[in-house]
Amino acid sequence: MGSVEGIHLHSTKLSMAVSAMRRVFLSFLLLFLVSSSPSYSISLHNSSSLQMQASIFLSLKQAFYVPTTCLDTWNESNFMSLCSWTGIQCDDMGSSVVSLDISNFNISGVISPAIGELQSLLNLSIAGNSFSGLFPPELHKLTSLRFLNISNNQFNGSLSWNFSSLRELEVLDVYNNNFFGSLPLGVTELPKLKHLDLGGNYISGKIPPSYGAMEELNYLSLAGNDLGGLIPGELGNLTNLKQLYLGYFNEFDGGIPPEFGKLVNLVHLDLSSCGLEGPIPPELGNLNKLDTLFLQTNQLSGSIPHQFGNLSSLKSLDLSNNGLTGEIPVEFSELRELSLLHLFINKLHGEIPRFIAELPKLEVLKLWQNNFTGTIPPKLGQNGKLTELDLSTNKLTGLVPRSLCLGRKLRILILLNNFLFGPLPDDLGDCVTLLRVRLGQNYLSGSIPYGFLYLPELSLMELQNNYLTGWFAEDPNKVPSKLGQLNLSNNRLSGSIPSSIGNFSSLQALLLGGNQFTGEIPSELGRLKNLLKLDMSRNNLTGRIPPDIGNCLLLTYLDLSQNQLSGPIPVQISQIHILNYLNISWNHLNQSLPKEIGAIKSLTSADFSHNDFSGRIPESGQFAYFNSTSFVGNPRLCGSYLNPCNYSATAPLQFDDGQSARPPVTSRFKLLFALCLLVCSVVFVILAVIKTRSVRRRSSKTWRLTAFQKLEFGSEDILECLKENNIIGRGGAGIVYKGTMPNGEEVAVKRLLGISKGSSHDNGFSAEIQTLGRIRHRNIVRLLAFCSNKETNLLVYEYMPNGSLGEVLHGKRGGYLEWDTRLKIAIEAAKGLCYLHHDCSPLIVHRDVKSNNILLDSDFEAHVADFGLAKFLQDTGTSECMSAIAGSYGYIAPEYAYTLRVDEKSDVYSFGVVLLELITGRRPVGDFGEEGLDIVQWTKMNTNWNKEGVMKILDERLTNVPLDEAMQVFFVGMLCVQEHSVERPTMREVVQMLVQAKQPSTFPSR
């Protein structure tokens, strides 16, 4: 049996071997037949070509940093599938790569010169990445290239490429990179070029007139550069042009060339924000294909050309923020396609024409800040398409039209600061699309339309300073969850405040002051967890302050003054740890003042006056800092110097009706006792005066030196510095002398005015100096020593040879303070303040941050000076530039108007002013041609708090300022000078944001 199985197994193996040999033979035969055919040669060639091209792409990839797996298909072992690699497209034969598109892959790195070996490329797009460095000049080898898009990267260098070999190029897009130098002339040699975008770079110089010879162009953008000079009229020869962008950050001379009237195929013309002057040429009225015309934010003057009525295709017209005069041309009635009309911030006058309301497609109408008179066209909104309306700050009268929200599309309604009267249309209560409503500063009367305050999308409602009457309607079924600010102040509203106010869950500011509200304050206010500001002053509210207000933990401002409130102050208010302002004056509140309120460290202003409080004023916490006037009008309250607690004097006398057991004291004994007491007193006073004069005579000339590090000089050396010819500065804090010690070390000696250790103004000054002397930080001026006697205090600092930032920036040397140096100074000064706020325990509030208190060493490194001194100077009255609390004019935070105290956020505001000084080169006050205008207000007026507007306020002495850095610093400055202190960043956050300015973000995309 076994032998049979063995024979069978042997025959099976033999059969399998014969079968395998047959397959090998057939394979060799097939290979021979294929190799002898021409198609095999082609396939072999394709394989070699694909492998060679694949190696080029792999060479490119080696210079990339790819954070994702998007290019994992780019693999050498996969070269035969090259045409299916990510971003790669081959020709119909599958042998040559004709397109490389890796746009928006978030790739960084550089582009290798190997790109020039892909000579079959027709399309190259690497837009929307983070490539940097120079774009390889080997580009000129791509002679078949038709489409080149490298926009939205970080390439730099000039654009002086060899364009002469790129004869097939139709599209060149280098938008939003860091290219510099002048505009490339080589592009004029590209006969087929149709699309040219060089915008969003740092290209300077003038526009070459030869650019007017690129007759095939249908798209040209040079916007967002640093171009200047006149716009050449030769650009009017580009008659095939459909889109032309020349604005944004360029600063041209002269005006708009009349030759632009020849661009008859133009659809989109954008010349905004580029310094254009003079009148608008009427020739632009020839562009009857134009659907968008943007000329805003220039210095254009004169009237609006009536020829604009010929622009029958026009959809968007923006002439805002210029100096245009005259009236709206009647020819505008022919603009039947117009959907957007912006004419705000001009000097236009006359009535708003009635035909504006009859434009069938009008959606956005903004005419604010002009001199328009008359009434609002009564039919405005009847086209059913109106979405945004802003007619504020004019001289309009009459009624608010009833049809504004007829189409239920109105989102923005702003009519503030006019002379409008009469009732609000009831229809507004059903305008569910409204987002922002600003109708304050008018003469509106009647009641608020039902439902108007409860609209579901509403984020802002301002009706203040009108004559509105009626009630704040209750509507418990509606939840206006998006309303952030409600201002009904200074009207004639009455009735009770509805409990449904608790449904306004996103409310940050509730301003109801100056009305005739009655009843109790609803406890539902405690549900407003996002509330920052609550003002119910000047009403007729009664009852108690609800303890639930303590649940509004983000509240910074609370004013319940001038009502009829009674009962005690709820201790729950102390739960609001960031409360900054509390006013409950002129009520009928009683009982004692809760000592827990003193634990609110942020409370810088409180007014408890004119109530019926009793007992002793707490002396702990913040109560120690409140003005005595905060407690007046409470006759049963004692503790302030206006009404000191003196229980022995105020206690009632006790009488015993002649039944006292004590024997009477004789008058002779009383007289003898009085005489003895008088003699002893006189002797004591004489001895005290003699001793005091003796001690003062001995000690007044005795100097005590406190050193905060090892010194090689003594008090005598310091006193030698106090000479008139050594004075290097004077200020509210004192006089500063420069001195050279015997070892050659240079120091600055500050002689403080108005503070003497023996005076009543010491207030812990010596202890504070000990604290300041222990501070060590690279960006804080080192206090070397403190030298004093009974009459004089001297502070010895390290000497800063370049003086203060204020002296340099606003003096003759300001022009030499380049942008990089200014940014470095800003970062270093911020680090110094950050140390005081966040790394010192307890934290140190500077109280007088200004450019003159930022000193510069020999390398222009910034050092913060004079920190912690202001609170000792405030009591002396010797400082003319210091406020009653601390700070210098132009640097003081707005909350000073109602707080009388400062905190670290006040320092942040002052530092924001310093940042604006560095950006603009202007002083905080006095450089703006209008009394009372400071740098913060001036900046706001000129930029509308838009960081892209920073170029309008940039110091003219600066050159080659990186736009992204300037915008970032301006953005930080804007945050620092926010009106509400809680909205300002901390100094730690300021440092982080300023450091990020050295890591530029990309230019804003179109």
Image (tube, grey):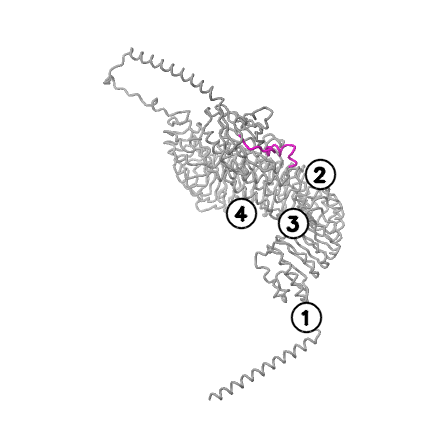
**Residue sitting nearer the eye, 779 or 365:** 779
| Residue 778 on image: x %, y % | 54, 38
Which mark, by number, is residue 278?
Answer: 2
Mark 4 or mark 3, which has the lower sequence index?
A: 3
Please name the residue that numbered disc 1 is placed on.
44
Amino acid found under the numbered disc labelled 1? Leu
| Label 4 crowd bin: few (<14), some (14–19), many (20+), radius 10 Å | some
| Residue 488 on image: x %, y % | 49, 37
Mark 3 or mark 1, which has the lower sequence index?
A: 1
Mark 2 or mark 1, which has the lower sequence index?
A: 1
Where is residue 739, by image quadrant? Answer: top right
Secondary structure beneath disc 4? loop
Please name the residue that numbered disc 3 is placed on.
177
Mark 3 and mark 2: Cα distance apart in space = 32 Å
| Label 1 crowd bin: few (<14), some (14–19), many (20+), radius 10 Å | few
Q: What stretch is highlighted in magenta?
A: 796-816
Secondary structure beneath disc 2? strand
